[in-house]
């Protein structure tokens, strides 16, 4: 594990740096960590042909976890990724992001296109999350985090899903600081996202992947692919948002194909 520091606020960002070749950055989803890429085999597969930088986004994994919502402004998270690239002495890299990580990717290709060779969005959107976090989890998720912590959050999430949260996901979420996660969600709901009017100007080669049961993300991916000049989308038949990354083999092949073209 290596540590980069965001010079603007001193927050420490943990990342893993393995493999050789063109650089690819892996950005995980909300409540997860870089460990999700390792556990599902993405790092093992991609390091065969690329230098892989797997980042713990602030508030997650082994990175610092501030409790103030404003610490999770998207511009600040984007600056964290740039700080990792600087620390690793990487001028530009391909970005692969799932959910939260995909939203970071959209903001990167909008604000810092010179640092991105190509972009793969997995279950992602360019839009604001305002009003949609509860749709992903459950009504009252914020109170559950602040008052009951991760055990309450995980239990109520399972109730809302109609089945218990699987052991691997539960373990990943249990590792979170509930106050930091609540602060992140507070800020995420207030972010404006990338404006539709910006999409025709996002020229980075982009692959947008979403499950057919992940209807909102699939619709956003289709729309973005039609509006962006160098983008295409692929549907994952029968998968919802939580199933985007696993089973991994087909998704890894799609990513690898996109990276070969970048």
Image (cartoon, helix red, strand yellow):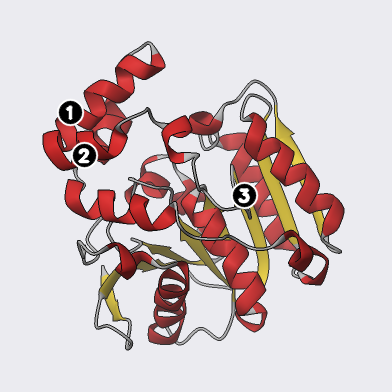
Secondary structure category for the residue under label 2: helix
Mark yes or no: residue 46 visible. Answer: yes
Instruction: Locate residue 218, reporting x and y percent.
Output: 69, 36
- Left or right: where 7 falls relative to 75: left
Residue beneath disc 1: 152
Determine contact: label 3, label 1, CB under 8 Å. Answer: no
Residue reaching furthest top?
162
Residue reaching furthest left?
148
Front disc: 3 or 2: 2
Give the quarter of the figure containing the C terminus: bottom right
Residue beneath disc 3: 125
Mark 3 neighbour class, 10 Å CA radius: few under 14, some 14 to 19, many 20 or more? many
Please tell me which of labels 3 and 2 falls first in the chain: 3
Q: Residue at x 19, y 44 (%)?
A: 175
Instruction: Locate residue 203, reporting x and y percent.
Output: 79, 71
**Alpha carbon of mark 2 to alpha carbon of mark 1: how far?**
7 Å
Does 133 appear above or below 139? below
Does 128 appear above or below 140? below
Does 60 appear above or below 71? above
Give the quarter of the figure containing the N terminus: bottom left
Residue beneath disc 2: 145
| Residue 148 figure quarter | top left
Mark 1 neighbour class, 10 Å CA radius: few under 14, some 14 to 19, many 20 or more? some
| Residue 202 figure quarter | bottom right
Choose between 223 and 205: the one closer to the eye. 223
Q: Residue at x 51, y 29 (%)?
A: 243
Does 31 appear above or below 80? above
């Amino acid at each position: 594990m290596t540590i980069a520091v965001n010079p603007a606020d001193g927050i420490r960002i943990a990342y893993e740096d393995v493999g050789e070749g063109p650089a690819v950055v892996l950005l995980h989803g909300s409540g997860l960590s870089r460990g999700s890429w390792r556990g599902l085999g993405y790092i093992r597969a991609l390091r065969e042909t690329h230098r892989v930088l797997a980042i713990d986004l602030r508030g997650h994994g082994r990175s610092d976890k501030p409790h103030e919502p404003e610490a999770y402004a998207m511009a600040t998270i984007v600056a964290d990724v740039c700080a990792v690239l600087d620390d690793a002495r990487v001028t530009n890299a391909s970005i692969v992001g799932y959910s939260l990580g995909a939203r970071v990717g959209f903001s990167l290709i909008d604000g810092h296109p010179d640092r991105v060779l190509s972009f793969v969005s997995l279950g992602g959107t360019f839009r604001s999350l305002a009003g949609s976090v509860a749709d992903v989890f459950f009504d009252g998720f914020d109170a559950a985090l602040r008052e009951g912590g991760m055990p309450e959050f995980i239990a109520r999430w399972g109730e809302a899903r109609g089945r218990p949260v699987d052991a691997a996901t539960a373990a990943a979420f249990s590792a979170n600081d509930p106050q930091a996660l609540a602060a992140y969600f507070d800020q995420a709901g207030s972010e404006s996202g990338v404006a539709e009017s910006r999409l025709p100007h996002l020229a980075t080669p982009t692959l947008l992947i979403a499950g057919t049961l992940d209807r909102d993300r699939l619709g956003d991916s289709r729309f973005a692919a039609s509006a962006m000049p160098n983008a295409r989308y692929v549907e994952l038949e029968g998968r919802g948002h939580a199933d985007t990354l696993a089973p991994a083999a087909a998704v890894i092949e799609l990513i690898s194909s996109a990276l070969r073209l970048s």
